[in-house]
Image (cartoon, grey):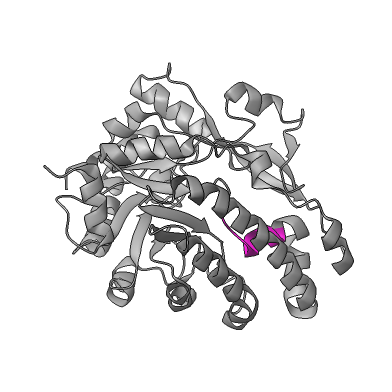
Amino acid sequence: MTTHKDRVLMALNHEQPDRNPVDLGGRQTTLSIIAYENLKDFLGLSELPTNVMAHSWQTCYIDDEILDRFGVDTRHIRPPSKVNDSIGEHLSSAGNDGTFIDEWGVTRQVVGDYANLIDHPLRDAKFEDLENFPWPDPADNYIFDGIGESAKKLHDENQFALVGSLGSPGNIFEQAWYVRGLQEFMKDLIKNKDFAQELMRNILAVRKRNAELYLKEVGEFIDVVQLADDLAGQDNLLISPKIYQELVKPLQLELCEYVRSMTNAKIYYHSCGAIAPLLDELVEIGVEILNPVQVSASNMDTSQLKKRYGEKLIFWGAIDTFEVLPNGSIDDVKAEVKKRITDLGTGGGYVLGPVHNICADVPPENIVAMYETAKNI
């Protein structure tokens, strides 16, 4: 009998499994807090707890009862946050207007089911200010002790593919503009390159520290390890390929090599948007899995991506959260699932999931239709 883990590993090895594997509950493939409350009510499971995964992203963990009900083939191994793991703590940590300051000093404000960035601690910084900035230590923000035991137990049970999340996203470019401000950092990349490089190198040091703390606990047990760095918007890249190659790629390569030195897990890389022009570059730095495959973005046609990169990349995600899941009928959702499995899953190489975290605008019945359809194809 094919196990959930077998199914995923076959897909990761570009082999055709008995059915296409599915994912839910990861850093970029979970539900917002509001969406999860709606789903639990719809399923008659409102008594299940809601545990916050990431206050900064307004996301939560998915209970095993729901994962089992949907036939989810993965389990995510994530170090718990030292704060905001419960709804009560999550709500009490925000000000009356929903504002809070994250571990990087970035001010955020909860609006609906998202926490917008509203102020940046290094907006007015000069090069010399970087040395004295209080760079966060992941050990102060996440609990790494004990996750190795949990990962080993799941590994030994051999039922599910284990997906590793460092706690942080693992991004470099994106975090740089979070702390600097998008407009200022984009100017830095052109006119203030020394500052941009030094800023990103400090962020890389934090990410490597995070990877070390995490992977020494779970590196031998996980099948996939997640990294992320949004480099594209809806219609094009956020930066030119030349700037990427000069300033960002060397740092991403260093992080990927560092991660690879501590685990044999496949490297999963998340970038929203029209990322197609950089796919060859990402393959060069060691990326093996592309997420989220934002099908609503320019040049992200799934049949063409499979044709061009089906032997180089595994695709993860691809069920449209921009139009189909929030606004489509159940029949639209079923058609979307069938198309993505046909385009990306033929011959293996695809793990199905939402393009991004499912938000409150998605009707619960569409979530159910997505996973029920995937189970029955």
> Quick one: which residue is furthest to the bottom in this view?
242
The quarter of the displayed image where residue 290 is located = bottom left
Q: Is residue 72 left or right of residue 142?
A: left
Q: Is residue 359 left or right of residue 339?
A: right
The one nearer the camera, 217 or 109, is: 217
Q: Position of residue 139 (x, y in %)?
A: 65, 43
Which image quarter holds the N terminus? top left
Residue 270 visible in image: no
257 over 44 or under it: above or below: below
Q: Position of residue 81 (x, y in %)?
A: 59, 36
> Quick one: which residue is furthest to the top in this view?
47
Q: Is residue 172 magenta?
A: yes
Q: Give me the residue at 34% from left, 24% from top.
A: 43
Q: Position of residue 136 (x, y in %)?
A: 72, 48
Q: Is residue 358 left or right of residue 55?
A: left
19 over 312 or under it: above or below: above
The quarter of the displayed image where residue 44 is located = top left
Q: Give me the residue at 40% from left, 39% from top.
A: 151
* Label tally: 0
Residue 87 visible in image: yes
Report the span colored magenta.
Answer: 169-177
Q: Is residue 333 left or right of residue 94?
A: left
Q: Position of residue 193 (x, y in %)?
A: 76, 77
The one nearer the camera, 76 or 263, is: 263
164 over 342 or under it: above or below: above
Q: Is residue 153 magenta?
A: no
